[in-house]
Image (tube, rainbow, N blue to C red):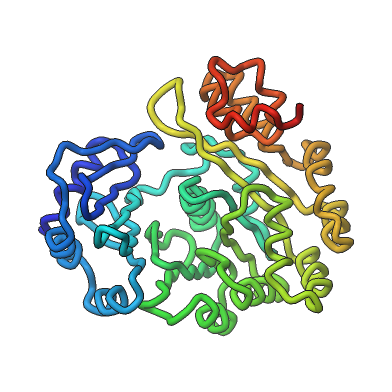
Amino acid sequence: MAQIDAFFKMLHEHGGSDLHLSSGSQPIIRLQGELQRVKFKMLEHEELKRLLYEITPENKIKEFEESGDIDFSYEVPNLARYRVNFYLQSRGIAAAFREIPEEILTIEQLELPQLLAQLAMLPKGLVLVTGPTGSGKSTTLAAIMDYANKVRKDHILSIEDPIEFVHQPKNCLINQREVGRDTKTFSAALRGALREDPDIVLVGEMRDLETIKLALEAAETGHLVFSTLHTISAAKTIDRIIEVFPGDQQGQIRSALSESLRAVISQTLFKRIDRPGRVAALEILICVPAVRNLIRDNKSYQINSVIETGRNYGMQTLDDEIMRLLKKGIIDPNDAYNKAVEKKKFRDFLTRPPEDFTEQYQNA
């Protein structure tokens, strides 16, 4: 047992999501979305470096000392897996660990719309789950993959950096590949994927032009592709994908995206006030013909209007879902206001002034 495992046990027992170890600081854990300092001595660079290197593969140590940051996964047997990031900062070495539960929660357990189960059954196309860091994208994707694994009889191939949730084959064959260990890059793995007879391809993150291009090609050639982006709305997701490409290619990409995109799920996490835990508020865009036309015609700014009128197709705006959670007493009014898009709708629910005073002037 590595010395650092004691911190992971503490994090797990407290129900925390993240552990931060930083030179010149006490350990810090994130509970229900908030950082809390642990009663422990201040960690110094050399001591922390020894703790971290004890669990680090040799090739990752070499990479870290050359680049100043690395990602990998670490597992504590009978406890949990962790997504790991090391980085250098002004006081020395630092690390962030995100706990990945051994149990994959279902769509029902996460209280997500049943529409997500329908997305898992699509024959082909591109489905994106987006949101800021720490918004639960990986958890949502894992639930969708788990549903497909139970119901479909297909080949699921994932490309991740690092592998987070570990799926055991049920009705499907599942192969999970880790960038850096099983393949050099996302793009190299995606090029190979088209020769590996997958029905569903999960790309952990669409990070660059080549990965986005290959993911679109896979979706266009009859595969169901799931991936993530760090964007905060469906419309911004579409803009982000197109803007990655040079100007002379954007028209072609709009056309390809309009044909292959099936849905965008943009989510934000809230701390629950009705019971311990967190809950996700989702914006859902389904690519009906009206949406395809807007993408093709470079009118993504009109997509929000389609979402607002698309409830019959399972669409919902982020603000409508936040309002539903607020009225059911699940989330705090101030959190609702701070994360809403049209803040004016939520002002009457506020119990204290907004945390960002500049936002009170929006939509005035």
The residue sitting at 59% across, 81% down in the picture is 194
Q: Above or below — where is 166 with respect to 331?
A: below
Which quadrant holds residue 340? top right
Q: Position of residue 175 (x, y in %)?
A: 44, 71
Q: Is residue 4 left or right of residue 303?
A: left
Q: Locate the C terminus by quadrant.
A: top right
Residue drawn at (54%, 24%), measured in percent from left and top?
Answer: 334
Q: Is residue 109 above or below residue 3?
A: above
Q: Residue at x 58, y 26 (%)?
A: 325
Image coordinates of residue 51 in percent, x first then y, are 15, 60
Rendered image quadrant of residue 151: bottom right
The reply, left or right, for residue 245 in relation to residue 78 is right
Say which quadrant the N terminus sits in.
Answer: bottom left
**Residue under the image location 60 percent in, 48 percent down:** 117
Residue 221 place in picture, x, y as percent = 70, 76
From the viewer's side, name the closer residue of 222 and 41: 41
Where residue 91 sits: x, y (%)? 25, 58
